[in-house]
Amino acid sequence: MLEGKVAVVTGAGRGLGRAYARAMAAAGAAVVVNDIDADVADETVALIASAGGKAVAEPGAIGAAETADALVARAVEEFGRLDVMCANAGVLRDRTLRNTSDEDFDIVIRTHLRGTFQRADRGEPVPEAMRRRGLGTADDAAPAVVFLASDAAAGVTGQCLAAGGDRLALWSHPQEVAVAVRDGGWTPETVAAIFPSVFEPRLQDYKQAPPPGAATPPGTSTPEKKGAQ
């Protein structure tokens, strides 16, 4: 699905980023693997190479212009172009604990952290009931990312897509507007197959209205201003 394309994946040394990088390489893309930790970036490159894929490591902290320039330059230098930028790197500093009870905190940790660790890090599959509710592994989110990086998703922009376990959903803040569930999870090809019928009819329209006085192109209409007098 991504043959001939070149991708940069930031934060690709572990977790979701590593899953995205490996999935893109498996789909045919050459991948520039970025992570602040050079050792884990090299590990991801080794995993991709051992599976027959193409990848190079370009470590560095995201946020500096120098790192961004280096990532683009490395992609062009090694593979001649850059088609996909997967901005996965990030940090979480959630300090809204004053409204969380001990019981609620323990349930979250036990379900989302220890539950995934016990089953996925020990090689055990996530139970079907949990997968259908959207709880899975990092690899479960990767097919949707590969689809979004492909030509099949060229018309998709500004959307919020949620993927986890067997569940794939389109969101329109603050709620889901379309959802599909597939036993056994998703592949880039099955995401591409279901997207036109299930999700495309519900995509949000982000087209900008023409400025006042401008001619409206044939076949289009100017959105109404609701509530205006």
Image: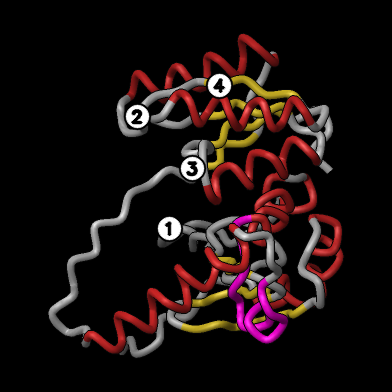
Residue 132 magenta-highlighted: yes
The CA span between labels 3 and 2 is 12 Å
Which type of secondary structure does the marked residue at label 3 adopt?
loop
Residue 203, horizontal then vertical, whole percent: 63, 71
What segment is highlighted magenta in the picture? 126-138
User: Which residue occupies the foreground of this view, 153 or 90?
Assistant: 90
Q: Quadrant of the C terminus?
A: bottom left
| N-terminal-most mark, 1 or 3 | 3
Looking at the image, the residue that sits furthest to the top is: 77
| N-terminal-most mark, 2 or 1 | 2
Which type of secondary structure does the marked residue at label 1 adopt?
loop
Residue type, mark 3 in image: Ala
Please name the residue that numbered disc 1 is placed on: 211
Please name the residue that numbered disc 4 is placed on: 57
Specify few, some or many for label 2: CA neighbours under 10 Å numbering under 14, 14-19, or 20 or more: some
The mark closer to the camera, 3 or 2, is 2
Residue type, mark 1 in image: Pro
Residue 87 numbered mark, or none? 3
The mark closer to the camera, 4 or 1, is 4
The CA span between labels 4 and 1 is 46 Å
User: Which residue occupies the foreground of this view, 110 or 190?
Assistant: 110
Residue 211, horizontal then vertical, whole percent: 43, 58
Q: Quadrant of the N terminus?
A: top right
The residue under the point 55% across, 75% down is: 171
What colour scheme was applied to this rendering of the protein? secondary structure
The residue under the point 68% across, 82% down is: 132
User: Which residue occupies the foreground of this view, 216 or 226?
Assistant: 226
Marker count (numbered): 4
